[in-house]
Image (tube, rainbow, N blue to C red):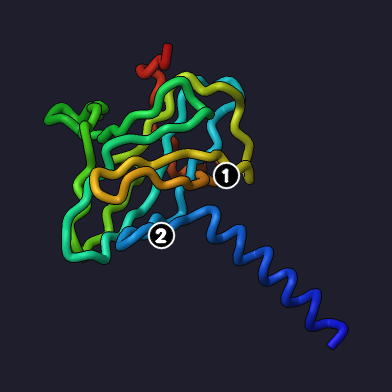
Amino acid sequence: MKFLIPLLGALLISATGALAHGARVGTLEIIHPAIPQPAATAKTAAGYVAITNDGPQADRLIGVETAAAQMAMLHVTQAGADGVATMTHLEGIELPPGETVVLEPGGMHVMLMGLTGSLTEGQMVPATLIFEQAGRVEVEFMVDPPASAGKPAPDHSAHGGN
């Protein structure tokens, strides 16, 4: 019995942290919002997340707000016929019913421009995802380890943020 109470307490703390990181609102599940740790002097960073729409109707992610950056926008990276990747601002990201949409490196992502401070691995970055139907959803982006040598982080230097 002596060991049961501390174990239950540890599980409760662990579960609470997990719930704060991801979120569920209505039929939407927000899964592992994350930012790969950028260089200490970086002015930009990219955020990634998976969003599952378990409902019968579509929704749309239309914005992101965070105090960690002067501006947060939805972007997509696309490779042109010449092989050069470019990023384009998205007005919204469709979330079809019964599907999971993944924002990931090389595709759709949250672009954080004009970082207001350095981001360190393990840090939790509060943000608000804004949906057309579900409204405003508070989440925390976890700062993950920097992109590995095998998977370089996308070059966001063209997005000044000022």
Residue 103 location, x and y as percent? 33, 46
Q: Secondary structure at mark 1?
A: loop
Pick out the residue farthest to the top. Answer: 162
Which residue, given by chain and number where applicable, does mark 2 sit on? Answer: 24
Judge the density around disc 1: few (<14), some (14-19), many (≥20) Cα neighbours within 10 Å. some
Mark seen at residue 70: none
- 131 sits left or right of 140 in the view: left
Foreground disc of the pair 2, 1:
2
Residue 106 location, x and y as percent? 31, 40
Which quadrant of the figure contains the N terminus?
A: bottom right
Query: Which amino acid type corresponds to the residue marked 1 in the rendered image?
Result: Pro
Residue 89: which quarter of the image?
A: top left
Judge the density around disc 2: few (<14), some (14-19), many (≥20) Cα neighbours within 10 Å. some
Q: Are marks 2 and 1 in contact (CB under 8 Å)?
A: no
Mark positioned earlier in the residue sequence (2 or 1): 2
Q: CA distance from mark 2 to mark 1?
A: 25 Å
Residue 131 location, x and y as percent? 29, 44
Query: Which amino acid type corresponds to the residue marked 2 in the rendered image?
Result: Arg
Residue 8: which quarter of the image?
A: bottom right
Which residue, given by chain and number where applicable, does mark 1 sit on? Answer: 145
Pick out the residue farthest to the right. Answer: 2
Which quadrant of the figure contains the C terminus?
A: top left
Q: Secondary structure at mark 2?
A: strand
Please state which of residues 93 and 84 is positioned toward the viewer in this rendering.
93
Residue, x 43% and y 40% (percent of image)? 128
Residue, x 56% and y 60% (percent of image)? 18
Residue, x 34% and y 40% (percent of image)? 130
Residue 81's place in the image compared with 29, above or below, is above
Residue 35's place in the image compared with 17, above or below, is above
- 11 sits left or right of 1 in the view: left
Pick out the residue farthest to the left. Answer: 81
